[in-house]
Image: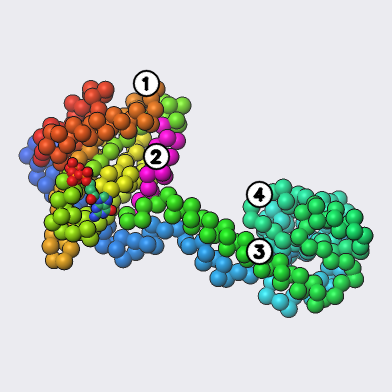
Amino acid sequence: MPSALVAHIEYRKNLSGGLSTSKLQSYSAAHRRFRILRGILIRQILQVYGSALFRSPNPMSVLQTFVPRILIAEDSPVSRKLLETILAEKPYDLCFAKNGREALDVFAQFRPDIIVTDWVMPDVSGVELCRQVRKSQGPGTYIILVTQKSEKEDLIEGLDAGADDYLTKPFDAGELLARIRVGCRTVQMSREIEAKNVLLEKAARTDHLTGLPNRLAVEEFAAKQLSAAMRHRFSLWVIVADLDKFKLVNDSYGHFGGDETIKRFATILTANTRAADMCGRLGGDEFLIVMSHGNKKSIVQTIERLRADFAIDSCTVNGQAISATASFGIAGFDGTEATTLRELITNADHALYDAKASGRNLVRAHVRIPALSELVPTAKR
Ligand code: GH3
Ligand code: MG
């Protein structure tokens, strides 16, 4: 096993105590090397596979292989066979129901894109089927009612119940196929709108530069977590982080060098945050981390480790290595005293201000939690 990995394992084991000071020091150094190597590896993986790892499958891609699923609800075996014969030659995915109740079951299971339904059926009529389908959640289904009823009142009743189109028996096969094509176009268009809405919703909550959740998303998550923490009495921590003298980074290495530094910080934040927690970019060089359930000691250790990882790491732009540091302010809800997100963030901001005023590249906790502030180192490492 590589020595750095052995050191990492030993270092982790020692978090619960047990190693001599000299051994711990040597393991600490090796452990730090391990973390840096791991950081570099994560960054390289993200550079190659980043988009695939961070993005869920593109919702638009499913539309490229759109094969409409059509449910035929018809109690007459002869009519059912006729419909099947007309539609079987086309590239449709067909399913069948012998009555209205069965149609509802098939609908719930397979969510067809189009339903071609008879009006008069045992149990549940075609009109009732329209009503039930419209009541259910989920993507829109295009419904064509096929019936012998041809009075205007019938047509109005069918359309009001939720049918999109109406065809009277006996129908022309070409007309049925044409109406199904209209249904396919309508369904595909509504699927495209849904897929675009998903993308827009995601874009509205994502920071463009880093791919992290943006202010809206991370604050919304924090507010939800805080109300759950107060209800179920678990601890919640918010950490505000701000890059140190970042204007100087921009001035020295240009805006692109600054951007790369922001991205590098985001990668380190992500690598150090558990799946149940969240880190987001508030804007500029400011970030918010939301962590729950941890105890004071583990939160301080995590943030200290994060601070050290960032300070020791660097990125290269135009052949120049760019390093930077960040300061952190921690505030916590300890599971007992009610608070608001606004108060927590304000307290974390005060602690951050304290870290900046005390020399930067520091972690500071809000003083309302004395045991926590005792654990925070007061000098740079
Ligand atoms: P301090 O240690 O007190 O935080 O000093 P600072 O220079 O970091 O001051 P401040 O946090 O106020 O400066 C943030 C700078 O970040 C100002 C702005 O030019 C820069 N900035 C904001 N957004 C971006 C961005 O998207 N890319 C780059 N490259 N720079 C940005
Ligand atoms: Mg700053």
| Residue 372 seen from this side | no
The residue indicated by pointer 2 is 219
Give the percent coordinates (x, y) of residue 193.
57, 60
Query: Which image quadrant for residue 227?
Result: top left
Q: Which mark is residue 79?
A: none
| Within-10-Å neighbours for mark 3: few <14, some 14–19, many 20+ | some
Q: Is mark 2 within 8 Å of ligand 1?
A: no
Q: Nearer the viewer, mark 4 or mark 3?
A: 3
| Within-10-Å neighbours for mark 2: few <14, some 14–19, many 20+ | many
Which kind of residue does numbered mark 1 sit on? Glu
Per the image, label 1 sits on a secondary structure element best described as: loop
The residue indicated by pointer 3 is 187
Which kind of residue does numbered mark 2 sit on? Glu
Which kind of residue does numbered mark 4 sit on? Gln
Separation of marks 1 and 3 at Cα, in angstroms: 52 Å
| Residue numbers of the magenta segment | 211-226
**In the shown orientation, is residue 129 left or right of residue 7?**
right
The residue closer to the viewer here, 215 or 329, is: 215
Q: Is mark 4 within 8 Å of ligand 1?
A: no
Separation of marks 4 and 1 at Cα, in angstroms: 40 Å
Q: Earlier in the sequence, mark 2 or mark 3?
A: 3
The residue indicated by pointer 1 is 337
The residue closer to the viewer here, 52 or 81, is: 52
User: Which residue is painted at 36% across and 35% down in the image?
Assistant: 292
Q: Is mark 3 within 8 Å of ligand 1?
A: no
Determine contact: label 2, label 3, CB under 8 Å: no
Per the image, label 3 sits on a secondary structure element best described as: helix
User: Which residue is painted at 36% across and 52% down in the image?
Assistant: 207
Q: Earlier in the sequence, mark 4 or mark 3?
A: 4
296 lies above or below 211: above
